[in-house]
Amino acid sequence: MSSSFFTPTRVFSGAVVLRVIFLFYGLLQDAYSPVKYTDIDYMVFTDAARYVSQGLSPYERETYRYTPLLAWILIPTSRPGTFWFSFGKLSFAVSDVIAGWFSFVILQAPEGGAMTAERALKYASIWLLNPMVATISTRGSSEGLLAVMVVALLWAVIRRRIALAGILLGLSVHLKIYPFIYGVSIIWSLESAHTSTPVHKRSSTPTDSIEQLSAIKRILKFFNRSRIILITSSLTIFISLNLLMYAIYSKPFLQHTFLYHLTRIDHRHNFSPYNTLLHLSSAAPEKVSSLKLESLAFIPQIAVSAVLIPITLSKRDLAGTMLAQTFAFVAFNKVCTSQLTPTNPQQYFLWYLILLPFYLPSSSFLSRPHLGILALTLWIGTQALWLHQAYLLEYLGLSTFVPGLFISGILFFAVNIWVLGMMVEDIGGWGYDGEKKIKRIM
C-alpha cells in the first residue's frame, strides 16, 4: 500500500469529509450566531423553489435572476425539516466532488498530461481539498453545478464525444450565460485531421474564379462533421430549454434570466474597475450620458474572452485556453462581487479555479517559483487593499470611493491583466509537432 496521502481513496474521502464538516458547522452557526453561514443567494433559491412547488413562478421571489431550472432542481428544499432545507447545499457539495473527479480523470488522459494517478491527484486537490471551494458550495452557492458541467464539457471534447459536449454546452449556457465563450474555443479547436490546402494543379479557370472556389472550399471545410454536431446539439438544447421556460413563464423569464444582466448595476462589494463609475451611474442616473456604461462594458470583455483568446490559443491547448478565457471574463466583468465576511469568499474566482489544475503543471508560475510567489502575493495583496477600503466604507461609513476604492480596484485589475498575460504567453508557447500538439513536460 502506498504511504502517500495522494491515493484516490484518501483524497476523495478527505474531500467528502471536508464538506460534511462545513455542512454541520453551518447548521451550528445558523442556529447560534447572528452572522449566518448560509448564503443569502441560497435563501433566494429556496424561496423560488417553494413558489414553484406551489405552482407559482420562481420570479415571484424578488431578486431571483436565474433560470427556473435551478428552482425546479431545488424543489425538495420546500419540504419541511433541516435535511430537506439542506438538500441544495448537499447537491452542490456533491457536484464539487464530481467536478474534482473529472479533473483527476482528464489529468491522467494523454490529452490532459498523461500524469500518474498520484500526480494527477495532487493537482486535482487544488479543487477537491480547497476550503474555499468547500465553503462556497456548503453555504449554498450553485457554482458547483456549473463547475461540474464545465469540466465534464472539457472531458467530452477530449474524448471526442461531440454530441455530449454540445448538450453540456447548451445546458451550461442556459444555467449561466458565461460558458458560451467556451463554444468559440471548442469549435475552433475541432480541426479536421487534414486541413492543409493541396497544391493546385494547372487550370484554365480564371484566377478570380479560382479564388472564389477556394474561399467557398475553405468555408465548407471549416464546417466539418464535429463542428456541425457541436453547433447543432448545443443550439438544440439551449433553444429548446429557453422556449420551454418562455412558454411557461413568458417575459419575466427573459427579463430576469438574460436581459437583466445587460443593464445590471451592482456597485456594492464589487472588485470591478467599473465599480466607482457604476456607483455614480446608480446615484445620479439623470446626469449620466445616454451611452450606458453597464451595457458598453461588455465590448472589451467579449472581445478579449470570446474572440481574441480562443482564436489565438485554442488549437494549442483547449484546457489552458478555457482557463485564460474565464480569467479574462472575470477580470473584465463589470460586476465581480464579494461580501465582506470571512465566510463569504469570492465566488467568481471559482469559475477559473476549476480549470487551474490543467494549466498549472507547465506554467511559468511553477517552473519559476519566484514568479509564482510574486503573482500570488500581488493578487492577494491588491485584493486585501480593496477589501480594506470597502470595510472603511461599508462598516465605518467613511467615503472611500475616490481615491481609495478606485485606485485599489485599478491595481487589482492591473495585477489580473499581468497574470492573464503570463497565461497567454505560456499557452502560446505550447507548440505543435506536425499536426500533433507537443506534450507538455510534466
Image: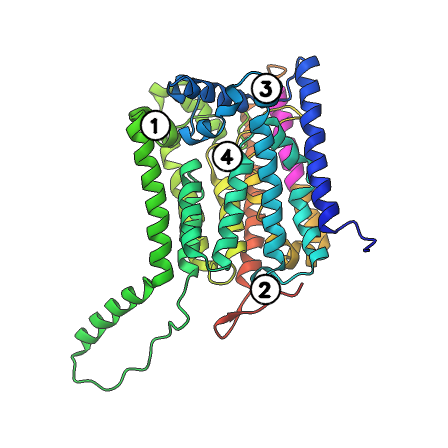
Chosen colour scheme: rainbow
Q: Earlier in the sequence, mark 3 or mark 4?
A: 4
Element type where label 3 sits in the image: helix
Q: Position of residue 408 (x, y in %)?
A: 59, 33
Amino acid type shown at disc 1: Phe
Q: Is residue 209 above or below residue 429?
A: below
* CA distance separating discs 3 and 4: 17 Å
Amino acid type shown at disc 4: Pro
Instruction: Tell us which disc is closer to us: 1 or 3.
Output: 1
Residue at 39% from the left image edge and 68% from the top image edge: 192
* CA distance separating discs 4 and 2: 40 Å
Residue at 64% from the left image edge and 23% from the top image edge: 341
Is residue 191 visible to the viewer in this orientation of the structure?
Answer: yes
Q: Earlier in the sequence, mark 2 or mark 1?
A: 2
> Where are the magenta residues, as a range?
379-393
Badge 1: few (under 14), some or many (20 or more) residues near its Cα, within 10 Å?
A: many
The N terminus, quarter of image: bottom right
Dot 1 and dot 3 residues touching (CB under 8 Å): no
Badge 3: few (under 14), some or many (20 or more) residues near its Cα, within 10 Å?
A: some
Q: Is residue 434 above or below residue 183?
A: below
Q: Position of residue 386 (x, y in %)?
A: 61, 30
The secondary structure that dominates the magenta segment is helix
Q: Residue under circle 3?
A: 393
Q: Earlier in the sequence, mark 2 or mark 3?
A: 2
Q: Residue under circle 2?
A: 110
